[in-house]
C-alpha cells in the first residue's frame, strides 16, 4: 500500500506563472532581509489590495498570518512575516516591484 502525500504540492497560482523580481525588488529583499521563500508565502497568503499606482499590495496582516499558521504551524519565521508586504505589477501579477516591512 502506498501512502498519499502532498510533499510536492504546488498551488495552481505557482504552476501557471513564476514570480520574477525586478532589480529594485531584489535590492530591497537583500537590504530588508526578506527571503525569496517568504515573498512567495506573502503573495500566496497575504491580503491583496490595489495600491492605486498599477500595483497589487500583498500584506501579511494578523488575519493572513493566522491563515498561514493554520497551514504550516506556528514558528518564529511565520510570526516575523507579520507586517511584511510585497507589491506586484497589476498587469501580470508575477513581477515583484518591491518588498518591505510595514511599521505601525
Image (spheres, rainbow, N blue to C red):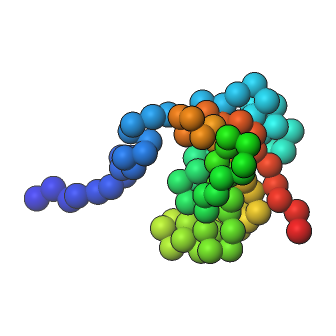
Farthest residue, direction top: 23
Farthest residue, direction left: 1
Residue 66 relative to residue 24: left or right: left
**Residue positioned 29% across, 57% down in the render:** 5
Q: Position of residue 51 (x, y in %)?
A: 72, 51
Query: Residue 25's quadrant in the figure?
Result: top right
Q: Quadrant of the C terminus?
A: bottom right
**Residue positioned 20% across, 59% down in the render:** 3
Residue 30 relative to residue 1: left or right: right
Query: Residue 19's quadrant in the figure?
Result: top right
Q: Is residue 91 visible?
A: yes
Farthest residue, direction front: 52
**Residue positioned 58% across, 50% down in the render:** 43
Depth order, front residue of 57/44: 57
Q: Position of residue 62 (x, y in %)?
A: 68, 74
Q: Position of residue 98 (x, y in %)?
A: 75, 40
**Residue positioned 70% across, 28% down in the render:** 22
Residue 20 relative to residue 84: left or right: left
**Picture layout, residue 100 above or below residue 69:** above
Q: How many marks?
A: 0
**Picture layout, residue 17 above or below residue 60:** above
Q: Position of residue 80 (x, y in %)?
A: 75, 62
Q: Quadrant of the N terminus?
A: bottom left
Depth order, front residue of 72/40: 40
Query: Residue 74's quadrant in the figure?
Result: bottom right
Q: Is residue 34 visible?
A: no
Residue 11 relative to residue 103: left or right: left
Amino acid at each position: 500500500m502506498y501512502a498519499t502525500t502532498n510533499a510536492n504540492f504546488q498551488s495552481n497560482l505557482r504552476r501557471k506563472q513564476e514570480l520574477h523580481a525586478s532589480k529594485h525588488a531584489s535590492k530591497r529583499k537583500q537590504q530588508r532581509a526578506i527571503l525569496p521563500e517568504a515573498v512567495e508565502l506573502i503573495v500566496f497568503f497575504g491580503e491583496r489590495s490595489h495600491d492605486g499606482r498599477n500595483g497589487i499590495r500583498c500584506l501579511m496582516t494578523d488575519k493572513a498570518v493566522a491563515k498561514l499558521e493554520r497551514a504550516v504551524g506556528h514558528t518564529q519565521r511565520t510570526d516575523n512575516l507579520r507586517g511584511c508586504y510585497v507589491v506586484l505589477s497589476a498587469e501580470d501579477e508575477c513581477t515583484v516591484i518591491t518588498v518591505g516591512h510595514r511599521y505601525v
